[in-house]
Image (tube, rainbow, N blue to C red):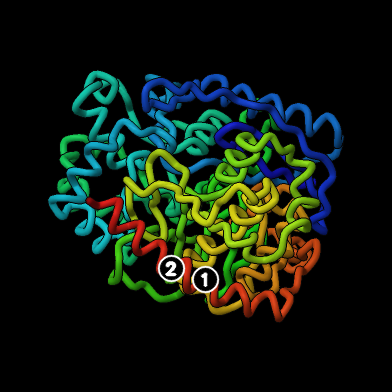
Amino acid sequence: MYVGIDVGTSMVKAAAFDTGGRELAVEARPVDLDLRGGAVEQDMEEVYAAVVAVLEAVTARVPEPVELAGLTGQGDGVWLVDAAGRPVRPAASWMDGRAHDLVDQWLADGTFETVFRRTGSAVFPGCPGPLLAWLDRHEPKSLDTAAAAVSCKDMVFQRLTGGARAVTDVSDASMPFLDPRTRRYDNGVVELLGLAHRRGLLAPVADPVATAEACGAGLPSGTRLANGPYDLPACALGAGVTAPGDGLLIVGTCLAALVATTELDLGGEPAGLYISTDRPGHWLRAMPAMVGTAALDWVLRTTGVRHSEVDALLAATPPGAHGVRVLPYFAPSGERAPFVEPRLRAELTGVCLESTPADLIRATCEGIGYAARHCLAAAGLTGSLAVCGGGTRSPAWMRLLADVLGRPLRVVEGEVGARGAVLAAAERYGVALDAAAWTEPTLVVEPDAARAAYYAKGYEEHLERVAEARERARR
């Protein structure tokens, strides 16, 4: 069997697959987030223990030899480790907001744009550059003690393999220090962010992806293991998104729009990032928005509606939700893709005493759909579109999303990130797997022509409202 490990932000999973890509078993363990006054941190030992636990559980459930294992996990954040990969302090999550003032300063003085023009990365408070700069100012002793500043899966890989040193891969290194053309760190950007004296903390980039044998924790000793890519590009692999122009929309707590490309364009409005992939000259143009199912969750809590009622309520009100409109920018940190607007907030319009919970829910889903369309357009989608994530569990929402986007959706269910991690590992170890079979969609949702035409006009109106809201946010 083949094992994929996905070390998520709130859940750690291990999935076992057979040679044809059929999911044999999945084990999951929750991990905590410590949220305090803008800080969002995680206990590295808890995360690593969860990895070992899910691996032991899934290999016990499927008592077959492990052919190989692939590792993926949450990106960004800063995981400070010593030479053995053990924590120096709690991990600073990609959700951490303490570096917000630094990013505001860099937006104002041009640093933000300069970094984007050099690396294709639009920095945000929870990515390594701002977090390391914040720690350098406020916790320099932590950086003095650390051997490396890595990402989540890099820490896990080092521990699982008993590695002598930390390494990362080109996908995790893409934000914000990697030059996407040379696939090496841009020391000018390191210096620009005030981190030249901390350059030694950046883990070497293993290009191609690092491989090593497991040392016996969770996996049988000697199991072949590959580190990377992180969860967004791993999901693209697991969904079969590799041809230029094809895209993936991950409908989760946040939306992530990814489009495969062989063209590097560092012009235009700085937003999102270019994720380097295993194949030189191939990138994923990524627009990881803050909009997502968290917006719908807020509306459901506010209206007292259960998740199980959403499909019926979406059918209870027509397209356009009786004039109710939602700009779904509910995140306290504003929006980061396909534009950066830290002070942008959600707006509900067209609401009156006759408006129903169904109107609010449908308008929210439509607003999220319009935001997704905006991200995919900015990322350069021209080919097919795959969809994965928790939002795919709602058939009615998938039909609405196909209509709003005006294109068929290849819905890919199951542990897509873990699947992609296995495919990446197989490529690195020269193991022949049928990628088409492994990435076959669960179903294809076709748009309704009449509703798609209605939403095409609605999308243009949405763009106008967004432009007006951005102007107000800057006043």
Residue 376 point in image, percent of width and height = 51, 67
Residue extending furthest toward the front = 353
- The front one of 472 and 42 is 472
Residue extending furthest toward the left = 109
Residue type, numbered disc 1: Tyr
- The front one of 237 and 321 is 321
- The front one of 181 and 47 is 47
Mark 2, secondary structure of its residue: helix
The residue under label 1 is 459
- What label sits on residue 84 in the rendered view? none
Q: Are marks 1 and 2 in contact (CB under 8 Å)?
A: yes
Give the spatial CA distance, label 1 vs label 2.
6 Å
Residue 255 point in image, percent of width and height = 54, 53
Number of numbered callouts drawn: 2
Mark 1, secondary structure of its residue: helix
Quarter-of-image position of residue 227: top right
Residue 151 point in image, percent of width and height = 44, 38
On screen, 119 above or below 194? below
- Horizontally, residue 400 falls left or right of residue 45, namely right
Q: Residue at x 33, y 52 (%)?
A: 341
Give the crowd class for mark 2: few <14, some 14-19, many >=20 residues within 10 Å: some
* Residue 160 in sight here: yes
On screen, 247 above or below 23? below
The residue under label 2 is 463
* Residue 422 in sight here: no
Q: Residue at x 82, y 59 (%)?
A: 20
Give the crowd class for mark 1: few <14, some 14-19, many >=20 residues within 10 Å: many
Q: Residue at x 65, y 76 (%)?
A: 452
